[in-house]
Image (cartoon, rainbow, N blue to C red):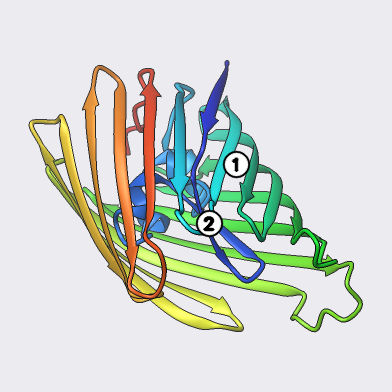
Amino acid sequence: KTVLILLSSLCSISSAFAQFYSAQSLSMGTTGVCIPDAFSYTENPAALGLHSQYGSGVRQQLFHPQKAAYTSEVFALRQMSSFSTLAVSFSYFGDREFRDLRPSVHAGFKIANKANLGAGLSYLHLAAPGNNNERHGVQASLGSLVNIYAGLYTGASVKYLYYTSANPNDVEIPFRLLSSAGISYSHKGKFTGSAAIHYEYPQKIAFGVGTEFTFQKLWQLRCGFGNNDWHFDFGAAYVKKGVRTELSCKYNLMSQPQVMAAISYLWNAKPKVQ
């Protein structure tokens, strides 16, 4: 059974390395690497291994007042077997200075009772119109997500991006390496806390923390912090009858705030019991 999903998700650009986050991760300090939610598959493809063949649809929009930045993504998800799930996607990010086109495939695998692995492969077409700075590249990712005990999860991922430049004077390093690791804990479905650390070679180390509170199984309030540009994150979600509506805000002290609105339709999309 193939489940078609429409997804528009947030994209954060760091040099040539674009990172896509779910609305939940954006409002929780970008700690999606350790959150057991399928929408965090761009941060950790192992999250796909937690979910069954039932699907969902999401639309998200990024508003950036000065750069007019936005992003969109379309992907199809299919459960290949009782222990594997596949997602095929096409994403686009654009603003007044930068374009990123990216077809991708991600897969998650349940390899043990409480352990999941994931892998992803993307082709990138990066362009800065008018600057003769067109690039083509490939990004590979690996991830793991382990349920240590009850609601305690630990996750880790590694992404490697290699690209070529059409500009012979381009002196940038032609690759990027991003590694992330984190831990999250959920208590009786009412409180979730998460923390993650990120290292992007050859730049810097960043960390983030986040929390989520659930009220009456309907409302979710989220907040987070990250030291990358010193951003404070806030968000809320309303879940009823399989529909999840989310609003997230990432406020950077060193740049313009970023806002994401999302609505997702969940058709019996329940995590596999671990």
Q: Earlier in the sequence, mark 1 or mark 2?
A: 1
Q: Where 6 falls versus 152 (above or below)?
A: above
State if disc 2 and disc 1 touch (CB < 8 Å): no
Left/right placement of residue 181 relative to residue 167 reads left
Question: Residue at image x 31%, y 53%?
Answer: 249
Question: Residue at image x 74%, y 80%?
Answer: 173
Residue 192 percent coordinates (x, y): 19, 51
Residue 143's mark? 2
Question: Residue at image x 34%, y 58%?
Answer: 250
Total tally of numbered discs in the picture? 2
Question: Residue at image x 42%, y 57%?
Answer: 33
Q: Amino acid at mark 2?
A: Gly
Secondary structure under the numbered disc 1 in the rendered image: strand
Q: Is residue 35 visible?
A: no
Q: Is residue 33 visible?
A: yes
Residue 204's mark? none
Residue occupied by mark 1: 107
Left/right placement of residue 189 relative to residue 252 reads left
Residue 5 percent coordinates (x, y): 53, 26
Q: Where 192 falls versus 75 (above or below)?
A: below
Q: Where 21 falls versus 241 (above or below)?
A: below
How far apart in space, not on screen, are marks 1 and 2 (Cα)? Answer: 10 Å
Residue 255 percent coordinates (x, y): 41, 70
- Using the rendered view, name the quadrant where residue 129 is placed: bottom right
